[in-house]
Every structure is written in C-alpha cells, then in structure tokens.
Image (cartoon, grey):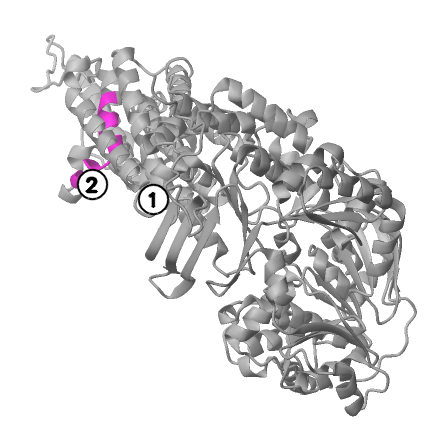
C-alpha cells in the first residue's frame, strides 16, 4: 500500500533550528518588490517557525506581512532569498507545498461563495482538497461544534454576520487539516466573541493536532496570544521573540505621567533628550525613557509642574513596537508648534452636543442600529468600540445627517435631526471624517484642502489663512506640495482630519480613523485628537475596532449587533465587568502545554495566551488554590496570579450579559 | 467523474442557478434576442408605400396602376394630382416611391407613341432604393408585354408575340427568397458566440475580484481541473440555448431545415466549447469583470456580426475582410449552420470547417492553460 495522498503525519522533518527543534518554516533574506522594483514590500526578511507553534507577524498596513504569507503559500513569486516550508523549497516548487497548507486571505470570509450555503461551502473545500469521508465527517462536526455554526448549515454564506463568516472561512481553510495554517489578518474587525471562538480552534489544533500557524495581525493585543512574534515595519522584521520576552527585554522605562495639563506636559516631555516617545492617554501621558535612572518627578517640578504624578507602568507590545520603530527611523516626532491655526477662538460652553433617544436604523429586515440612547458631554472624546457590522458607522452617519433614522430622536449640535432643514444646517456645524479615505489621491495636499474649503463655502480671504494654519498646526506644511497618493496612510489620515476641521466645527465625527495605521502614526493621530479636545474644546465622537485604543477615550460605548451594550469610562467598564464576572486567573508555567492540558480539563474556559494560560473566574481565590494544588501535584513549576480584565475581556462579558452571546 | 472537477462544476452550477444576473445572461436574454431579431430584422423589401400622381385619369392609367396595386411589393397610399402633396408624402416618409403619370398617357398609348412615366424613389437606403427600382421596372415590363399581346391579338391572324429570350428562374436552398431563412440561422451563430463568451469571461475574473481565486491558487488543484470544472456547466447552458434557438427557428419562425440535426449539434457543441474558451481566456487576462465583459463584447460580437457572413457573404469581402473572416470561429460555424438549414448537406461537406473549429478550440484552451498561473505575481 502506498501512502494516501492526504498526509496523515506532517511531512518533511528535515528542518531543525540550532537547538535541534523541528521547524516548519525557514525564511532567509526574503525580498520582494512590486511594479518592476519600484515599490518595496519585503526587504530582507528572515525568520523561523517551530512546528506546533503559533507565530504572529505584527505590523501596520503596508509592512509586508501579506506578501510574506503569499510567498509562503506559493501564490506570489519572490525576487530573492529563500523560503522553505516543511523542507520544501517554496520558491522552486510552489505546487509541492500546497497540499500541506491552508491559506486564508485577508478580509472577512473572502474565500467563501456568498450564494452557497454554509454546508455547500464546506463541501466544496472538502472536494477541492479531496479529504477522505471519515476524516471529513469527524473534523467537520468538531469544527462546527466549536464555532457554533451547526444551526446555520443551510444559510447562504452571504447572509452570515462578519464574525460567523470568518469562522466559516477558517473551517473551510482547515477542513483538510493542513500541517501549516497561513492566516492573513484573520481577526481584523471580527467581534470579540467570534475572535474568542477563533482562538479556541487555533489552540485546539495546535495542542491536539500539532498544527503550526503563521498569522498576521495589526492588533498588538492579539500578539500576546502567539508563542512567538515578529514585529514588522516597512518590509522588515524590526524585532522578534516571545511576546513576554520582548516586553521584558525592552530597555528603558515606561512611566505614566500626570498632574498637569496634558498639552503642557507633552511639550515639556518632548524636549528631554532621553525621551524615546510620549503618548497622550486622556489626562495622562505615557513616557518611554531610554535612560531609566532619571527622576521624572523632580525634573517636572524644575520645569514648573506643581504636583506631578509619576508611576511605573508595565509596557505592552505596542510600546515595544514604538520603541523599535523610533530607534530604526531615528525620527524626531514633532508636534506642530501652535494649535492656534486649528482652533480659532475659545468655544462657548454648549449644552450636550449629542443626545439620542432610541435612535434606530433598519435596512429591510436588518436592524443596523437598535434603539441607541446616549449623551455626549461637551469637550469629551467618546469612543464607539465594536467589530465590523456592529452599527458604528451607521450610527455616526445618522448623527451626521447622512442617513435617515428609522425611529428614535437625536439632537446634534443644538439641532433636532427630525426638524425640517436640520440635516442641511448640521453640515456646517460638524466635521466628519469617513471610514474610507475620501480625498482625491491625485491632488496635492494643499489642493485637496483648497477643494474642501471651496466645498464648505469658506470665504476666499479666510481660506488661505485657514489652510496655512491647519497645515502648520497638524505638521503637514512640509508635505503641502506632495501628491496625496504618495503619502503614507498615517499622513493621509491626518490630511483627512485637516479637511474635516476646515470650517471650524465644534463637533467632530471620526469613523475608524486609525484602521490599519501603524502604531507610531496612530499614537500621533491620537495626540492631535486629545489636543483638539482639550485645547480647542472640540467634542469628538470616534469609532474604532481596536480594543487597545479604548484607553484614549474619556468614555466608551461598546457596540455589538446594533446595540449599545455598555457605556462608561474605560476603567469603570473594566471594573464593572470584573465586579460582575470576576477577575482573570493567570498561570505562567515553563511547560505551558502540559499545564494547559491539565487545567483545561478542570477549567473549560481556560485559554492559552502565548505561553500564559488564563480564564475569568467568579471565585478567584478557591480557583487559585485548586490550580496551585493541581500543578504542584503534576510537578509543574508555575506562577499563578490574579489579574484585572482587559478591555476585550470586559467587552466579551458585556456582550454575553446582553444575551448576544451567539455571535 | 474526477472529483475535483466535479466539485468545481457543482459549485459553478449552484452559483449560476442562484444568481439572477447569470441566469438572465444564460437563458432570458438569448431568448429575448432571438425573438427580437427573428421578428424584427428582415432584409425583405415588401409592402412599400406607393403614391400615384395621376394627371391622366383615364382607363389606361387605371389599368397601368392595377399592375402595381395587385403586387405584394407595393401598398397604394393614395392617388393624387397635387404635386405639393406628393412632395409632402415623400418628405415625411409616408411614401417611398412616387409614379408620375403624365396627362397624355392614355392618348399616347392608344396612338402607339412612347410615353414617359416619372418614377421618384426615396434613396435614403440605397439597397432598398435599388430593389424598388427593380420592382418598378419589372412591373412596367409586364405592362408593356400585356399591351403588346393585346395589340397583336387585335391584329388577328393568330399571331402571338414571343419574346426571344425567356428566363426560367429557380432559386436553390431558399426558393421563397425569404430573408428569415438566412437571418434566423445566422442569429444562432451570433448568440452562441456572445453569451457563452460573456459568461466565460466572468468565470475567473469574478473570483479574482471577490478573492476566492486563492482557493485554487493555494490548493493542489490542477489548472486543467479548474478550466474543466468551470467550462462544463456553461457548456450545458450553451447547449440548452442551442436547443431553444433551434426549436424556435423550426417552429416559431418556420425556417426550412433540410440537413442533419446531428451534424448541426456536433458543430454547435464544438463552437460553444470554443466561444466559452475565448471568454475564459479574456477572463484569465482581465482584472475586473467590467473590463472582461467589454473586451469580450468587442472581441466576439463585432467581428462575428461583420465578418462571419451574417450580413455580407464572405466571398464578396475584400482581401482584408476575408482574412479577418477566417480568423474568427463564427465564419466556420456559419458555413455549417447555413448549410445544415438550407442545403441539407451531410457531415462529409463540413469536415474542413469542423476541423478548423477543433484546431481553434485547442489553441484557445492551450492559451488558457498556459496563462492561468496559480499565482498573482
């Protein structure tokens, strides 16, 4: 009997690393440029992925992540370098690796056929991959159970929610149980419940089937779920390692600084030569210093800050990323010197700029926004946090007068949206930055501003002054004569912000302004938003699907399936979720796989976050005792601790509480 | 059947049956097209609006007019002696031909003197004007003949005039000289060119646009399996269209069919494989569905309409035209179709055309296979 075409055991065990561990991927000095070498995508990337591990390539749009995945999947050629997958030279024999891999392209369920039902989609992939019947049935039933998609077998894929689509896409990608999964931004814009299901499947495959995973993401918080990460920027891996190690090895010191007006704070901190980066988070700033021996409080007092508050905070992967990017680019981050150009005169204190009562939007039998009531206070930054399809954009469009509500009432900038002519009058009072980049790519930066000034009907004598003010204030002056298309995404978003500010609105709507933008540019963008709110008194309503951006907002509305499931300050929300559902129990063990096997049997909610195991526990103290006893009995050395909830965990809690657990 | 081909085939069929646009392109529009063109596109010149400007108003002039009125080629609009009204009728298009009978028409004929009848024809469509002139001349000749016979019989003596050369016209293949007998089979060629090619043109590029193309690129599926799985369902569509058009031609338009249904079907099968392949090739090269559709439309219908012999016989084209004609598959299938409908020839007469179609098909699919790279760059 010859071996079946369907490989039972992972093939190609020829590759090992220096420590003799088995490798599934080895990439050496890989290079790829597009458009006859004019556009660089991958610039000399090398990395290794161990068999049975989850490796994450983390970075913003345009960092080269997708190109690497496509080269490894054998669907894109490389210019030079080497890429081996399970011992096979991918560049020379791309077809040979295809039976071994499952590749999921970027985008929500883009590998699915919308008119085909869930079952028909799965069946197509089974037949395409020629999966033997017995193995198929068993695998399919298990995957359907884990994703809770079984009740929807007959539903066309086009009528699934974003999260469900993505779970189905994952099932289709791994119905043949590949040795290696190549997943391109599998969780971008996916709701937290589906994301959790998604990771449950990945962990199951890795622990029980020895599958290896290479995935890309632009979520820094997600990177912590990987065993190993490579941080990517501008086509290079700028740092690689286990997430906890990367954080631990970061030189310098991260401190939270408060006690003064943020705008003065940021200007002082930026002057210091040891400052590696400063980022505003609400009233406070995060300061990363290259030299950790500096007494920040004393220095601040010298600079005239009366009672500075300074304390050390743990760094996150995003801080590591920013640290490495700043080092590589050696770029001085300079905020525009004066914001006078942005905000002309001090605003009058307004009544609540936004107040809605049960505002609803239906499209046919689909309810995009379901009876949302909220109030936004003057000068605050209110964030709408939620996955794609949660209704954030529709809500913003209704509040901007771009979409007619089906029911409910809303008052925006002193206008009743239901009143005659209100929607037209509204446009002069608000600034709106849409989700998709809506400027003219072929125009120069200044020309775009000029065009929008004309569209807003700015008087000619005001126009020049206003545009120059904005260019200077937002640090765009040096790019004024550049064509918009040639700017990186972060700068384009800043230009879009400038366009939204042209007519001096008091109320600003930002719809996913930082989606796909690199962390450094993202932090800068948020700095502008903070300064606009604090110095200019502008009220900001901003939507995002990045959980880690929540901390930037004064208050946060969590949206899921059209409903506002929670509203409050970020810390309040986390505290409330912890009060209701308990804190996290976290276990750090050297032999994490063995620990996970044992703990998962006792605590079914336990999940692997890279090398950490954790679960939410309503009774943390007894659970910690049991865990310690279990691990001690098994002879596993471990650190068991109690931890607060992250925003994502709080989100999952509120969604489940709202009875929307079935994503 | 080969299971990967079968998987793709089943998927394509399901998508086709569930998408109103594809269903429309597959079945509704071809049927609408055969009905519209079958009933509407006629090259026959009949029932031409005719006006007499009769200044004679005699027995003779009425007799002369009778010859025209009783012909199916002309419809008498009116008889008048007002030249301004005549000019009006011509200008407005209510009359296409005017025959002016002079005041002394009857007298001159009786006096055996030649008389001149003025014929004015609307020349906006040259072909039609030529046909009108021919009809008028023929009916005029009949009248002359009739006068001659009458004169001779009056002379008595049993003398009968016999025109020296007489013509026995027999028209083969289309004895009634009805244009539907050529138009409707020609439409079969055009429709089986356009719709299979357009549907074929969407096959790959649609999946490129949606991103599902990576399902093939990143799996072990072979190129020929993709091509076969995608083409076969649409070959089914083309053959159903073929049967619908064949049925319509026989029993709705009542076109003569004298040849072998088997040969025609074989030709249609080969031709459809070929036209789907042309669409597929465009689909492999194009980046967007819109571009693929436009290119297909330009690359298939335009040459097929002008050069396949649908309107003008290939033999009457100039060298360049004949060269183009032999570059497109429609020309070969046109020969098979016209022959099958009208001439009733068997397989033996078409082996050259069928071989040409076969070669063409091989070349098209060879190009598809070579150009369908399982990579994006």
| Mark in front: 1 vs 2 | 2
User: Where's residue B341, x and y in %?
Assistant: 27, 17
User: Where's residue A373, x and y in %?
Assistant: 88, 53
Q: In this view, does A309 lie above or below B4?
A: below
Q: Which residue lies furthest to the left in this view?
A: B164
Residue A316 tag number? none
Q: Tag 1, which secondary structure?
A: loop
Boundaries of the magenta span: B322-336
Q: Tag 2, which secondary structure?
A: helix
Q: CA separation, marks 1 and 2?
A: 29 Å
Name which residue lies at 8% across and 20% down: B165
- Let me know if residue B328 is in the magenta part: yes
Q: Label 2 is found on which chain of the structure? A: B
Q: In this view, does A567 lie above or below A199?
A: below
State the image quarter where residue A570 is shown: bottom right
Name which residue lies at 37% across and 47% down: A84
Q: On the image, numbered disc 1 is attached to which residue?
A: B124
- Let me know if residue B371 is in the magenta part: no
């Amino acid at each position: 009997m010859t071996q079946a075409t369907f490989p039972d055991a992972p093939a190609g065990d020829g590759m090992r690393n220096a420590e003799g561990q088995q490798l599934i991927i080895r990439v050496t000095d890989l290079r790829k440029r597009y458009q006859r070498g004019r556009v660089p995508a991958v610039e000399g990337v090398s990395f290794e992925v161990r068999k049975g591990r989850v490796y994450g390539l983390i970075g913003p749009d345009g960092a080269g992540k997708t190109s690497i995945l496509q080269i490894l999947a054998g669907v894109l050629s490389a210019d030079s370098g080497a890429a081996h997958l399970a011992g096979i030279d991918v560049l020379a024999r791309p077809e040979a690796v295809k039976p071994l891999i499952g590749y999921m392209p970027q985008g929500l369920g883009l590998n699915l056929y919308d008119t085909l039902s869930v079952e028909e989609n799965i069946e197509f992939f089974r037949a395409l991959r020629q999966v033997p019947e017995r193995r198929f049935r068993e695998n399919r039933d298990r995957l359907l159970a884990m994703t809770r998609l079984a009740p929807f077998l007959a539903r066309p894929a086009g009528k699934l929610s974003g999260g469900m689509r993505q779970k189905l896409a994952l099932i289709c990608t791994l119905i043949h149980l590949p040795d290696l999964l190549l997943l391109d931004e599998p969780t971008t814009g996916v709701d937290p419940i589906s994301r959790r299901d998604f990771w449950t499947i990945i962990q199951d495959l890795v622990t029980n089937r020895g599958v290896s995973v290479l995935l890309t993401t632009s979520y820094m918080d997600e990177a912590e779920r990987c065993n190993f990460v490579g941080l990517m920027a501008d086509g290079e891996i700028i740092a690689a390692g286990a997430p906890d190690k990367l954080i631990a090895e970061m030189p310098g010191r991260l401190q939270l600084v408060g006690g003064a007006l943020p705008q003065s704070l940021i200007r002082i901190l930026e002057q210091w030569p040891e400052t590696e980066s400063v980022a505003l988070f609400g009233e406070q700033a995060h300061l990363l210093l290259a030299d950790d021996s500096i007494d920040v409080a004393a220095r601040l007092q010298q600079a005239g800050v009366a009672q500075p508050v300074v304390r050390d905070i743990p760094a996150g992967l995003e801080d590591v990323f920013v640290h490495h990017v700043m080092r590589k680019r050696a770029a001085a981050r300079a905020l525009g010197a004066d914001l006078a150009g942005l905000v002309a005169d001090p605003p009058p204190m307004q009544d609540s700029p936004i107040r809605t009562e049960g505002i609803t939007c239906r499209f046919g039998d689909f309810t995009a926004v379901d009876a949302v009531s909220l109030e936004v206070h003057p000068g605050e930054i209110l964030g709408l946090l939620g996955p794609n399809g949660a209704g954030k954009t529709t809500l913003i469009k209704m509040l901007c007068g771009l979409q007619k509500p089906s029911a409910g009432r809303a008052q925006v900038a002193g206008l009743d949206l239901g009143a005659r002519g209100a929607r037209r009058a509204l446009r002069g009072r608000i600034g709106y930055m849409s989700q998709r980049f809506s400027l003219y790519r072929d125009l120069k930066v200044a020309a775009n501003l000029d065009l929008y000034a004309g569209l807003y009907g700015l008087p000619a004598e005001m126009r020049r002054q206003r545009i120059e003010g904005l260019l200077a204030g937002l640090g765009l002056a040096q790019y004024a004569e550049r064509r918009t298309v040639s700017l990186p995404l972060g700068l384009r978003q800043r230009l879009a912000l400038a366009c939204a500010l042209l007519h001096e609105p008091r109320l600003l709507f930002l719809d996913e302004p930082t989606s796909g933008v690199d962390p450094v540019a993202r932090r800068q963008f948020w700095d502008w938003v903070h300064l606009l709110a604090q110095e200019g008194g502008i009220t900001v309503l901003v939507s995002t699907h990045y959980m880690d951006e929540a901390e930037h907002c004064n208050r946060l509305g969590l949206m899921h399936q059209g409903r506002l499931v929670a509203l409050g300050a970020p810390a309040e929300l986390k505290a409330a979720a912890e009060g209701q559902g308990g804190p996290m129990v976290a276990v750090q063990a050297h032999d994490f796989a063995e620990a996970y096997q044992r703990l998962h049997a006792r605590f079914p909610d336990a999940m692997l976050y890279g090398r950490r195991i954790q679960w939410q526990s309503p009774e943390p103290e007894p659970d910690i005792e049991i865990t310690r006893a279990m691990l001690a009995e098994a002879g596993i050395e471990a650190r068991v601790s109690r931890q607060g909830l992250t925003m994502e965990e709080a989100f999952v809690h509120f969604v489940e509480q709202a009875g929307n657990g079935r994503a | 059947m080969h299971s990967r081909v079968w998987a793709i085939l089943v998927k394509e069929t399901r998508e086709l049956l569930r998408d109103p646009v594809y269903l429309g392109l597959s079945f509704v529009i071809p049927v609408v097209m055969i009905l519209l063109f079958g009933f509407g596109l006629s090259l026959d010149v009949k029932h031409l609006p005719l006006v007499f400007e009769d200044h004679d108003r005699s027995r003779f002039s009425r007799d002369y007019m009778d010859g025209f009125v009783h012909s199916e080629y002309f419809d008498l609009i009116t008889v008048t002696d007002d030249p301004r009204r005549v000019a009006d009728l011509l200008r407005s298009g209510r009359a296409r031909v005017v025959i002016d009978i002079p005041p002394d028409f009857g007298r001159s004929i009786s006096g055996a003197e030649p008389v001149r009848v003025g014929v004015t024809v609307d020349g906006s469509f040259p072909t039609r004007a030529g046909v009108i002139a021919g009809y008028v001349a023929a009916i005029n000749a009949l009248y002359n003949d009739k006068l001659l016979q009458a004169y001779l019989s009056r002379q008595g003596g049993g003398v009968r005039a016999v025109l020296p050369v007489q013509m026995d016209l027999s028209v083969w293949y289309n004895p009634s000289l009805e244009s539907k007998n050529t138009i409707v089979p020609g439409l079969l060629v055009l429709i089986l060119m356009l719709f299979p090619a357009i549907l074929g043109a969407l096959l790959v590029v649609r999946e490129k646009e949606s991103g599902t193309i990576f399902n093939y690129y990143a799996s072990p599926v072979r190129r020929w399996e993709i091509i076969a799985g995608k083409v076969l369902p649409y070959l089914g569509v083309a053959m159903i269209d073929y049967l619908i058009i064949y049925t319509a031609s026989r029993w709705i338009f009542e076109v003569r069919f004298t040849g072998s249904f088997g040969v025609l079907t074989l030709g249609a099968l080969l031709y459809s494989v070929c036209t789907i392949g042309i669409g597929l090739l465009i689909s492999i090269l194009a980046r967007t569905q819109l571009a693929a559709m436009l290119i297909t439309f330009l690359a298939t219908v335009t040459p097929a309409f002008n050069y396949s012999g649908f309107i003008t016989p290939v033999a009457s084209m100039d060298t360049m035209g004949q060269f183009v004609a032999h570059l497109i598959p429609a020309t070969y299938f046109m020969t098979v179709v016209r022959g099958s409908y009208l001439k009733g020839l068997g397989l033996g007469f078409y082996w050259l055309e069928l071989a040409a179609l076969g070669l063409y098909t091989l070349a098209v699919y060879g190009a598809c296979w070579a150009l369908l790279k399982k990579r994006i760059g």
